């Protein structure tokens, strides 16, 4: 009974740790996304003013697209940690898509 309680506690702690880590990554990715969006706005403004080039705009668009693709996550339900466990553990895996732009 004590071992089962410890196993549940471990599962809860692991799930919470995964959640906190996922939230931190999400916050970081939001910041990176906002920076890429601002860089695109600035490149477009420079191009419109004649001080920038269309290549600068295309580079900023490419950067924004790459960052947006990196924000894609895949959430999988893992099988129970041990036989007899009645609930699978949900974990989020952060992995950018394997395709190239």
Image: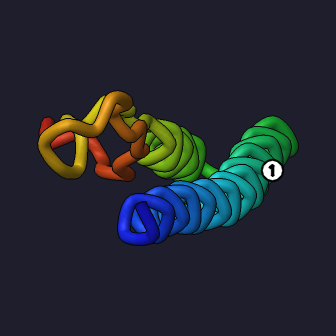
Quarter of the image for the C terminus: give it. top left
Q: Secondary structure at mark 1?
A: helix
In the image, residue 5 sits, relative to residue 42, either above or below, namely: below
From the viewer's side, name the closer residue of 35 and 85. 85
Location of residue 21 by image quarter:
bottom right
Is 26 situated left or right of 95 in this image?
A: right
Residue 40 falls in image quadrant: top right
The residue depicted at 61 percent of the width and 54 percent of the height is: 19
**Seen in the image, is 77 located left or right of residue 90?**
left
Residue that appears at 30% across and 47% down: 96
Q: Where residue 73 appears, x then y in whole percent?
A: 41, 37
Colour theme: rainbow
Determine the residue positioned at 37% across, 30% down: 87
Horizontal side of 22 relative to 83 (left or right) equals right
Residues packed near mark 1 inside 10 Å, few (<14), some (14 to 19) or many (20 plus): some
Q: Is residue 85 above or below residue 39?
A: above
Residue 57's x, y, as percent? 59, 43
- State whether residue 100 appears in this view: no
- The spot of residue 62 in percent (x, y) is 44, 43
Q: Position of residue 20 (x, y in %)?
A: 67, 63
Residue 33 appears in the rendering: yes
Q: Which residue is mark 1?
A: 38
Seen at 43% across and 35% down, the residue is 72
Q: Which quarter of the image is occupied by the N terminus?
A: bottom left
């Amino acid at each position: 009974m004590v071992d089962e309680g410890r196993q549940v506690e471990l599962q809860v702690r692991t799930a919470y740790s995964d959640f906190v880590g996922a939230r931190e990554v999400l916050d970081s990715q939001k910041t990176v996304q906002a920076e890429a969006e601002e860089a695109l706005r600035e490149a477009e403004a420079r191009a419109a003013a004649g001080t920038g080039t269309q290549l600068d705009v295309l580079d900023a668009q490419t950067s924004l697209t790459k960052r947006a693709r990196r924000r894609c996550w895949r959430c999988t339900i893992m099988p129970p940690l041990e036989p007899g466990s009645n609930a699978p553990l949900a974990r989020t895996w952060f992995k950018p898509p394997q395709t190239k732009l």
